[in-house]
Image (cartoon, rainbow, N blue to C red):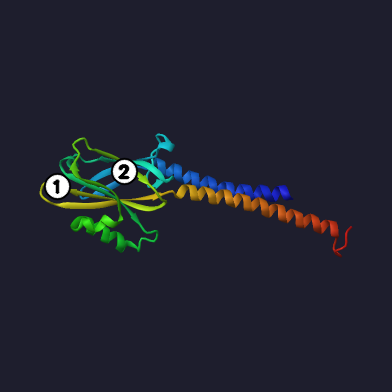
Amino acid sequence: MFIRIAAAGLISTGLTVSVAHAHRASVNRDICMLGIGQDAMQVTAYQPQDGDAKLCRDVPEVGPAIIVLDYVDSELRGMTTDIRIVRVSDDLGGASELTQMLNDAKVAPEALDPVTEKHIQAQRYPSGTINFEHVFTSPGKYHGIVTVKNTHGQTYVSDFPLSVGRAREGALWGYGSAVTAVVAGVFIYCMHARGRRTGPSGKPT
């Protein structure tokens, strides 16, 4: 009985952990596209400990990350691109807070300075590729805010979300659940064995 209970608990929690890893693997295979005005960029992140694994919106570990933006449309090469990595609250205050951030980036970018962790000043990228390193010092939610301006003075703003350090939290939760399941199985087995030894009357048999 104990073996069946413990095995069931491990299988259940094992599935939970597997789903977490499968989710991360599927995210790694995703191509994150960023639409900005009539054009688009591809966003990819890498972390040294993950080798060549491509990350999309989930950066699993706190620490250094390389973020790469590739222009999909060649028109962007003649425009200037400004990039900010900003920290946002976990609840983000709904869509209105993000809308305000994007509006600030367009008309009053200095308003974003207090929440900006990385700022790449506006410049042109004739090669069509932007790459930079940012060291995330704490887990949480971040947004990359991209501001593009063309030669006619028109400005377009878009953003991409980044969740940092959450994969480890999910794995720890899964392993903690596995330990809990095993402990519960041992407790149930001990209670069942005690009941068999004492018998229905409560006296030892």
Residue furthest left in the image = 152
Residue 104's x, y, as percent?
A: 23, 58
Instruction: Identify residue for label 2.
Output: 43
Image mark count: 2
Instruction: Identify residue for label 1.
Output: 150
Are the residues tagged 1 and 2 within 8 Å (C-beta)?
A: no
> What amino acid type should be assigned to the residue bearing mark 2?
Val
Residue 182's x, y, as percent?
A: 66, 50
Q: Residue at x 64, y 50 (%)?
A: 9
Which numbered marker is on residue 8?
A: none
- The relative height of residue 201 versus residue 13 in the rendered view (above or below) is below
> What amino acid type should be assigned to the residue bearing mark 1?
Asn
- The relative height of residue 99 versus residue 176 in the rendered view (above or below) is below
Answer with mark 1 or mark 2, whichever residue precedes in sequence: 2
Residue 119's x, y, as percent?
A: 26, 48
Q: Residue at x 30, y 59 (%)?
A: 98
- The relative height of residue 109 versus residue 33 in the rendered view (above or below) is below
Q: Tell me the quarter of the picture where residue 42 sits.
A: top left
Secondary structure under badge 1?
loop
Q: What is the crowding at mark 2: few (fewer than 14 residues within 10 Å), some, or many (at least 20)?
A: many
